[in-house]
Amino acid sequence: MTRRAAASRPRKPFVAAWREELPRVAASLTTALILFLASMSFTPVRRWLFASEVPAYPLICTADPLAAGDGRRLVEFYILNRSRDNFTGEDLQRRLNEALQGSGASGIATIVLPFRDEGGGRIERAVADREFNEGKGEIHVAHDDRAVRIGVRQIHGGALLRVQIIVSGIADFAPVSRDAKVAVPFDYLAMQESCYTRR
């Protein structure tokens, strides 16, 4: 087609041309919305999009389950200081009070892990992993049959501390994947965003 023929062809009105593009625009917008909503499931994305003026509490936690045999399960509980600052237990409580100020919520820096009832199971043992934690900080661990209590006495900037918990009397999963968080018999999921005990 020559330039002259193309120029002589009547142009569609703007509104008509826009209507023809609507299905493609709608598809693009729908895809963008789905991607945006999916990204909101990731904590770092939410923090970046909805940054708060309240100072964030620096600790986050996660846990990995491992088969220990004989009806026992090993849970490795991790405490991460996501900031570059060192903290004592008193510092952490002060930061937590600042982070919760005006929210109507309250909490304590001591980490309490309630055991989920799994038909007669109990917490057999809970200890700080001294070798793993060496040079990173210090934690105090206590427990009874139904809960583990972890007090962070000191944690260095960017440090990862570990507590090892043995639970007995519950059905073992074989093999247990570290990604199988459902196999962790403690209520800790809220601590993955901010690791403290809610009141």
Image (spheres, rainbow, N blue to C red):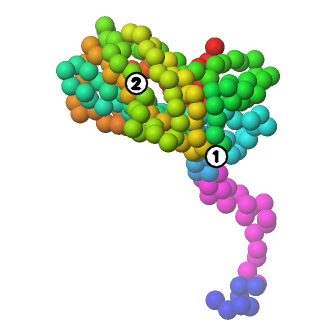
Front-most of 92 and 30?
Answer: 92
Circle 2 crowding by C-alpha within 10 Å: few under 14, some 14–19, many from 20: some
Residue 114 percent location from the top left of the image: 47, 15
> What stretch of residues is rendered in magenta?
8-30
Mark number displayed over residue 84 = 1
Would you say residue 41 is visible in this rendering?
no
Query: Is residue 112 located in the magenta-colored stretch of the structure?
Result: no
From the image, give the main secondary structure of the stretch colored magenta: helix
Q: Is residue 184 left or right of residue 46?
A: left
In the picture of the structure, the residue carrying the numbered disc 2 is 127
Quarter of the rendering occupied by the N terminus: bottom right
Residue 29 percent location from the top left of the image: 65, 51
Q: Residue shown at 72%/26% (left/top)? A: 94
98 up-or-down from 135: above or below = above
Front-most of 56 and 1?
Answer: 56
Q: Residue shown at 76%/84% (left/top)? A: 8
